[in-house]
Image (cartoon, rainbow, N blue to C red):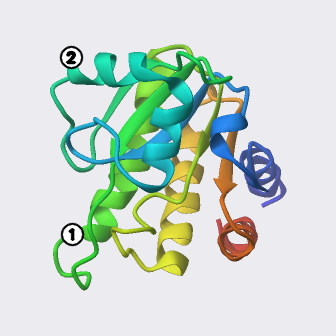
Amino acid sequence: MQRVLVMEERITGRMDVILGDITALALDAIVNAANTSLLGGGGVDGAIHRKAGPELAIQCRMLHGCKVGQAKITPGFRLPAQHVIHTVGPVWNGGGAQEDALLQQCYSEALKVAVANGIKTLAFPAISTGIYRFPADRAAKIAVEAVGAFLTTDRTIEKVTFCCFDAAAQQRHVQALAEYSDHG
């Protein structure tokens, strides 16, 4: 029993939650909550594209879009982060269209892309909780559980940060991380 607790502590110690601007983080990668075109939009997607500069849109054009639940990588260009991992979250339609599974897949696919590209530190925004209307409490729990499950089986990633834009999102992620730590 003690060994399981130590393992869980190491996993949750590799996840943290901050309040801030994801575009200001100097990590190996930040994750973009993109749309299927990858050509920029509103919210965090627009902020990342603005700060990265026009080179990001040029690079994204060459990727020919991205499907919901998938992830693709580009350089960070003018961002402090070296790379941007773009993932497309599901639009909330009441929960009957596999939204939970697709959101979980966004996190796991982004982490797989990170590992494949030698990324050790990365930050996620609260994917799908803006204009895609995914219930924020539910999304935070899915995010923490998906990342925790991945970190259980992979030692490559050293630190995953959930970067929250407002205090309410930060609190939701802190609560989800606490519940994961307690019940993991």
Secondary structure state at the residue bearing disc 1: loop
Residue found at x 59% / y 18%: 78
Residue at the (44%, 31%) spot, across then down: 85
Q: Which residue is drawn at 15% across and 26% down?
A: 64
Residue 91 position within the rendered picture, expressed as x and y whole percent measured from the top left = 26, 67
> In 3D space, how far apart are the residues under numbered discs 2 and 1 (Cα atoms)?
29 Å
Residue 62, disc: 2
Disc 2, SS? loop
| Label drawn at residue 98 | 1
Determine the image quadrant of residue 153: top right
Task: Residue 168 in the image: state x and y as whole percent.
Answer: 69, 77
Amino acid at dot 1: Gln
Task: Pick the quarter of the image with the C terminus.
Answer: bottom right
Badge 1 density bin: few <14, some 14–19, many ≥20, Cα 10 Å: few
Q: Using the image, determine if residue 56 lies above or below residue 132.
A: above
Which residue occupies the foreground of this view, 86 or 96?
86
Nearer to us: label 2 or label 1: 2
Q: Residue 133 carries which label?
A: none
Res 96 quadrant in image: bottom left
In percent of the image, x 41 and y 21: which residue is there? 54
Categorize mark 2 by other alpha carbons within 10 Å: few (<14), some (14-19), many (20+).
few
Residue 148, percent from left and from top:
59, 52
Residue 47 x, y percent position in the rendering? 52, 44
